[in-house]
Amino acid sequence: MNNQQNPKAIIVIFGATGDLAKRKLFPSIYRLYQNGKIDDDFAVIGLARRPWTNEILRDNVEQSIKETNASKSDVDKFTSHFYYQSFDVTEASSYQGLNDLMQELEGMYNTNGNRIFYLAMAPEFFGTIAVNLKDYCLEMSSGWSRLVIEKPFGHDLPSARALNSQIREAFDEDQIYRIDHYLGKEMVQNIEVIRFANGIFEHLWNNRFISNIQITSSESLGVEERARYYDHSGATRDMVQNHMLQMVALLAMEPPIKLTTDEIRSEKIKVLRALRPIDDSEVDENFVRGQYGSGHLHGKDVQSYRGETDELKDSHTETYVAGKVMIDNYRWAGVPFYIRTGKRMAEKSTNIVVEFKDIPMNLYSEDDGNKNPNLLVINIQPNEGITLFLNAKKAGHGSAAQPIQLSYNNNGVHGINTPEAYEKLLYDCMLGDATNFTHWDEVAFSWAYIDAILNAWSRRTPDFPNYTSGSMGPKEADDLLAKDGFHWWPIRDVVQ
Ligand code: BG6
């Protein structure tokens, strides 16, 4: 890892006219600039098909950072670092032009020949771009070159493998930064610290003391304008293959022997390798898929997934998935990790509930005889913090117990937004720190795990829609836990 404080680089964005660039990348680069993390030694080259000019790109960048209320002169100074080139990803001349522009800018800005190629566009071109970059843009560079690649990384394991080998023709594994923006979230990064910096948790963090772990990432939004992408993806590819399994890995990994990229990644890889494969005949017992019907959410009537656009009217794509993930290793044998994620659910919230087993002989219950397990709740978003649910004596006569909470809240320090995650990840990439990016082995094991589920599902037509917009998903997702004697901890209880 390079510890240089103000990294210098040219950032080339493929897909500069797109949504990701506008919503996440430009604001993130601006914040790095504003916070002094990058200095004047940078330039951004925006590439896309449209016949834009530098001025049009700069106007767009200005629009995308207008919420920061920066002064006009600051904005002008910042946007002057942006250059646009109209680009055809299949045309050699485009890459030659890009190389010429990079060399020209390297003369103007003191970037030491360092280059980041950020692929923020349709994944079908990822391979072509990598191969062309190798032919036209990598050899002449005197600094480092890194490739940042957005998801989806393939559609299944075979396509991910094919893509990976194309990319590897041009870039080594340690030059490839596969983005999973959940890994940039403050509280996702905090999982490791909460676990490994606290004796009171880590000693209990295993199958002797934990009964189950629940990870929920619910969204109240529907499919929005992404019907085409989403309908080919579905919730499992969109959220489980990456974000949800990454959280499982962080919760389940062994302590790394050092805080280095390789050590941390290798512990995560071991978890993903130990995921119990789901046999075709066991899929329905362990995984539930759903698609939202119409309903009522935040005071408004909302339509079903199939009603969102014409192209979705016969869709069998899942917008919800819940599953029981088992990890076959010494620490976790027998402990279910329940995951669930979906669109048009009651609330936007991501949280983790670690439920501890009861003690061998607990004589203390609430007045009604109810006993409450200890829970450790990690709130990822919108609130950021942790809450520990304990039992204490109910004031007054007798020895009845009542649940109490110890909470730490990070609210106000960081908001819900992902630009912060992107900002951190982009900076990590500039510094050469790949810890919070996914290694190929993580990607491959995750695909192998979910491919089995998707293959089984593809052979059976689901009975959709099966959950109402504004609910927490289909009833079968509750049954999944009920059969094991558990229940989902309601969001309202765990999010404080
Ligand atoms: C993205 C998915 O990776 O994550 C989206 O493609 C989803 O469908 C988003 O909405 C959720 O991210 P966040 O940060 O809002 O929880």
Image (cartoon, rainbow, N blue to C red):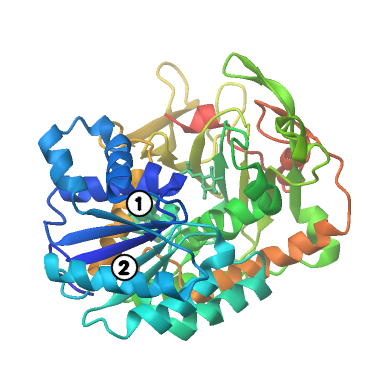
Q: Quarter holding the N terminus?
A: bottom left
Is residue 135 shown above or below 117? below
Residue 464 left/right relative to 105:
right
Residue 12 left/right relative to 364:
left
Q: Residues within 10 Å of mark 2 (few under 14, many from 20)?
A: many
Residue 42 left/right relative to 362:
left
Q: Which residue bears the numbered disc 2?
A: 116
**x%, y% of residue 92?**
46, 76
Is residue 313 shown above or below 78? above
SS of the residue at dot 2? strand
Indicate which disc residue 422 carries. 1
Closer to us: 148 or 117: 117
Closer to us: 357 or 223: 223
Q: Quarter holding the C terminus?
A: top left
Q: Amino acid at mark 1?
A: Tyr
Which is closer to the viewer, label 1 or label 2? 2
**x%, y% of residue 222?**
62, 33
Report whether residue 378 is seen: yes
SS of the residue at dot 1? helix
